[in-house]
Image (cartoon, rainbow, N blue to C red):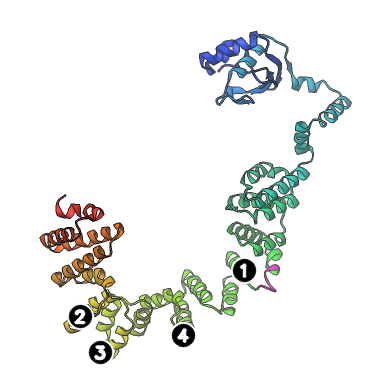
Amino acid sequence: MGSFPPKREEDFASLFPQEVLRRGLAYAREGRVLRVYRVGERLLGEVQGSAPAPYRVEVGPGGGGGCTCPYPGFPCKHAAALLYAYVEGRPREDLLEALGRLSAEEAKGLLQALAQVPEVAWLLGEALLPERTFLQGVRALRQALFLGGGEEEAKALLLRLPRVGEKEVLAFLQALLEAPFDPEPYLRAGLRRYLEVAGNPAPLLGLYEKAPFPALEEALLALGKAAPEALLPLLSGRDPGGLKRALRVKLLFALGREEEALGLMREHLEAPEDYLALVERLLALGREAEALGYAEEALEWFGKDPRLFSLADLLASRRGRPEDLFLRFAFRPSLEDYAALRALLGRAFPERRKELLRRVEDPALLARIHLLEEDWRSLDRLLRRAPLQAYPALAEALEERLPEEAKRLYLEAARHLVEEGGRARYQEAADLLRRAARLDPEGARQAARGLLLAYPRRRALKEALASLVGG
């Protein structure tokens, strides 16, 4: 497109499909362009279309703009008509030039008259009373949130944030805490504005105690790093949920006051989470010996609390002493720890073996332990007593050392699943037969055929086993 506003048809014709351009020219010739205004580099106007009320059209550089007509694309024929009317010198006026010619009294009178038009009054309110109109928007947001929506209202308020102050931003943030959608993106935008216009952390702390969103925490830490004396006193006193204390610890670390932060953490070692946080922080600071000491203390206090497995794992992996391995095995038995204890304890191991085995509830792990020790009698008892649902895992454990027994377990488990019936069970059975086929392809194929012969009317079974029997 050429210069804008255009001087001739060639400056804008390439923007339009030929048919749209032709119809726009016809509209211009028919006198349907009622008004043409120039506002800087934009053209505004009204074009009479098929509806009773004229359409409002705006066209700017590059063909951007819009029209109130229902045509799905832009630029439309009404935009083309507006451009034709402009280049042909139809009645037009540069509004900026016209406004520039007004006296102060005339401009004031014009604004007062325009304020009587509802659509214009809203725009004037946005320009002249941004705080008041923003708070009206926040009230609309609260109502929309109450009805289960509000995201569009929140997006609209984001555009107006740069023109408002602390009070308005706080009202916006407060409303977002009730959002039925994820408010984090909107909170972050509002908090950026709050940090620009205010330095008081107290209101944000009140919001954080109601809803500890990460964005609020980050904003508080930013304020605290800029002015520690303003935030730190607020982070003491009544604190039932421990939020203020945790935030104080983070701020102290951010300020480089490590010993003070660690002292505060040590004073409040009351639950497994407190020990976990302290140990993690000490490890991050390179204070391993101290971290291991607190890990041991936590395990002494809270025993086999499953949340503390990571501390047992830490002790076992960093120190590797028999008592550490015993502790980790008690939390989560594994063949690796069993074998390591067997090697470490040597002749003393049999005294602890029964204690270890009592902690193992997984039949497959027990099978692996018996295989490791070649305890065939215990393995035989285990297999005879094992429930059907344990057969697949047991078979997997036995595949390498006892392939025939593993195949038997796979086939027995598959047969039981087929007897239970159902498409999902048939698929599980087919998977077990495929595992058996790795050990004995022909045996698995015969077992599949036998199942199909036993249940000839089960179409879903035939589909599940088709690949095993050759179609």
Most common secondary structure along the magenta stretch: loop
Left or right: where 241 falls relative to 431: right
Q: Reply above or below: 312 against 224.
A: below
- On the image, numbered disc 4 is attached to which residue? 300
Which percent across, then down, holds residue 423? 29, 57
Q: Which sits earlier in the primary sequence, circle 4 or circle 3? A: 4
Q: Reply above or below: 128 against 19.
A: below
Q: Nearer the viewer, residue 390 or 88?
A: 390
Which secondary structure, mark 2?
helix
Q: Amino acid at mark 2?
A: Leu
**Mark drawn on residue 379:** 2
The alpha-carbon separation of the residues under discs 2 and 1 comes to: 53 Å
Write the start and end of the magenta stretch as one range: 234-239
The extreme left residue here reads 442
- On the image, numbered disc 3 is attached to which residue? 350
Left or right: where 309 falls relative to 155: left
Which secondary structure, mark 3?
helix
Q: Which sits earlier in the primary sequence, circle 2 or circle 4? A: 4
Q: Nearer the viewer, residue 455 or 76?
A: 455
Mark 4 touching mark 3, by CB under 8 A? Answer: no
The alpha-carbon separation of the residues under discs 4 and 3 comes to: 25 Å
- On the image, numbered disc 1 is attached to which residue? 243
Q: Which sits earlier in the primary sequence, circle 3 or circle 2? A: 3
Is residue 236 within the magenta segment? yes
Which percent across, then down, holds residue 179? 63, 53
